[in-house]
Amino acid sequence: MSLHELVDLVIGFVKAHDTWIIPIIFLLAFGESLAFFSLLLPATIILLGLGALIGESGLNFWPMWLAAAAGAFFGDWVSYIVGAYFKGDVVKIWPISRKPQLLTRVHHFFDRWGIWSIFFGRFFGPFRAIVPLVAGICAMPLRYFQIANICSALIWSFGVLAPGVFGLQWLANWMS
């Protein structure tokens, strides 16, 4: 199945079953933030499409935003826990075992930026789910990790959903 077909499948399902949109958004954001799984799931693209669907259908944005923020928050938290539990053995787990240089790059990023790496890492593709993993490996204090985690999750989730929602509304008003 191609990326385009997967995006169409999820968006088509949500169009037909809009009562599932909140749990689907939560799961997509969770998967996008979860170490290992995020490298395989094109959730950001799907979430951008769902943002447009939310704007088109007139659904309330704020519960969707909170679902995405919660999914992203919990995905990072689980990644942190996995890193704290497995430590250096994470490099043996697939798909990291196929690209151990990614873990090394993220570790350097984490060493350089500390708590800010948690915040800014959320906005950089493959780093998104690996930075929390490295934070766990390095035993970053959980309270600092969670502060950066919740702040970045709130902003990231707004950034992936809002353009579709508010952009379509703005465009409709502008064209009227």
Image: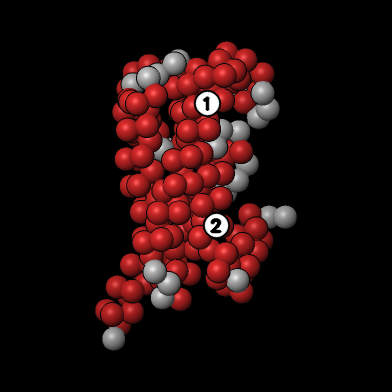
Q: In screen coordinates, is 82 left or right of 150?
A: right
For the N terminus, give its image quadrant: bottom right
> Splitting the image into 4 quarters, where does residue 153 fall?
top left
- Whether residue 136 is visible: yes
Please name the residue that numbered disc 1 is placed on: 81
Horizontal relation, residue 135 to residue 101: left or right: left
Instruction: Label 2, secondary structure: give it.
Output: helix
Q: Residue at x 55, y 69 (%)?
A: 19
Residue 150 vertical position relative to residue 160 in the rendered view, above or below: above
Towards the viewer: 91 or 138: 138
Does 154 appear above or below 47? above
Q: Which residue is mark 2?
A: 23
Q: Residue furthest bottom?
A: 176
Residue type of the residue flagged with mark 2: Pro
Is residue 93 found left or right of 15 in the rendered image? Answer: right
**Mark 2 or mark 1, which has the lower sequence index?**
2
Mark 1: which amino acid?
Answer: Ile
Front one among 62 and 14: 62
Seen from the viewer's position, the closer of residues 65 and 171 is 65
Q: Position of residue 57 (x, y in %)?
A: 45, 76
Residue nearer the viewer, 150 or 57? 150
Determine crowd level at label 2: few under 14, some 14-19, many 20+ residues with C-alpha closer than 10 A.
Answer: some
Q: In x, y percent, where is residue 42?
A: 57, 49
Name which residue lies at 53% across and 33% down: 78
Callout 1 secondary element: helix
Circle 1 Cα neighbour tier, 10 Å, few/some/many (<14 / 14–19 / ≥20): some
Question: Where residue 32 appears, x then y in whole percent?
Answer: 53, 44
Against 72, is 6 above or below?
A: below
Quadrant location, the C terminus = bottom left
Q: CA distance from mark 2 to mark 1?
A: 23 Å
Residue 155: x and y in percent read: 33, 47
